[in-house]
Amino acid sequence: MAPPSTPTVQDHVALAEIELCGELMIAASAADGERLSSDRIDEVLNVAVPAVAGIPCPPAEAGGR
């Protein structure tokens, strides 16, 4: 008797987090220093700097994809 088929479940949030962790590990392995700077982490994660005094900030540029 064949086992019952199991549905494929994808957690898109978890997959995105795993991808971001991978990007951070790649950046960390390529870094010269002991730690990544906050600016470098923001760059890897494609995080924009918060707006200052109501001036909107430009979107962060896409990573090397």
Image: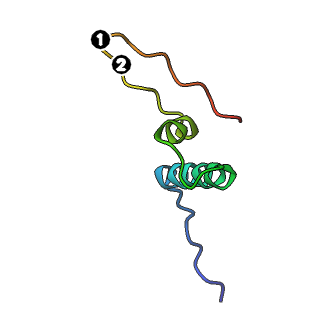
Quadrant occupied by the C terminus: top right
Seen at 66% across and 84% down, the residue is 2
Q: Nearer the viewer, residue 47 or 13?
A: 47
Q: CA distance from mark 2 to mark 1?
A: 6 Å
Image position, residue 11 (x, y; %): 49, 55
Residue 24: x %, y % from top left: 58, 50
In the drawing, what numbered circle is on residue 63? none
Most foreground residue, 36 or 5:
36
Tell me residue 34's x, y (percent).
56, 55
Residue sitting farthest toward the front: 33
Seen in the picture, residue 17 relative to 60 is either above or below; the reply is: below
Residue carrying label 1:
54
Nearer to me, 6 or 65: 65
- Whole-percent x and y of residue 26? 66, 52
Say if mark 2 contacts mark 1, CB within 8 Å.
Answer: yes
Q: Is residue 9 left or right of residue 55?
A: right
> Circle 2: is it few (<14), some (14-19), or many (20+) Cα within 10 Å?
few
Secondary structure state at the residue bearing disc 1: loop
Amino acid on which disc 1 is placed: Gly
At label 2, the amino acid type is Ala
Seen from this angle, which residue lies furthest left?
Answer: 53
Residue, x 29% and y 11% (percent of image)? 54
Which residue: 65% across, 89% down?
Answer: 1
Q: Is residue 29 left or right of residue 9?
A: right
Badge 1, how many Cα within 10 Å: few under 14, some, many 20+?
few
Q: Quadrant of residue 4?
A: bottom right
SS at mark 2?
A: loop
In the picture of the structure, the residue carrying the numbered disc 2 is 51
When the figure is inspected, residue 64 is found, relative to residue 21, above or below; the finding is above
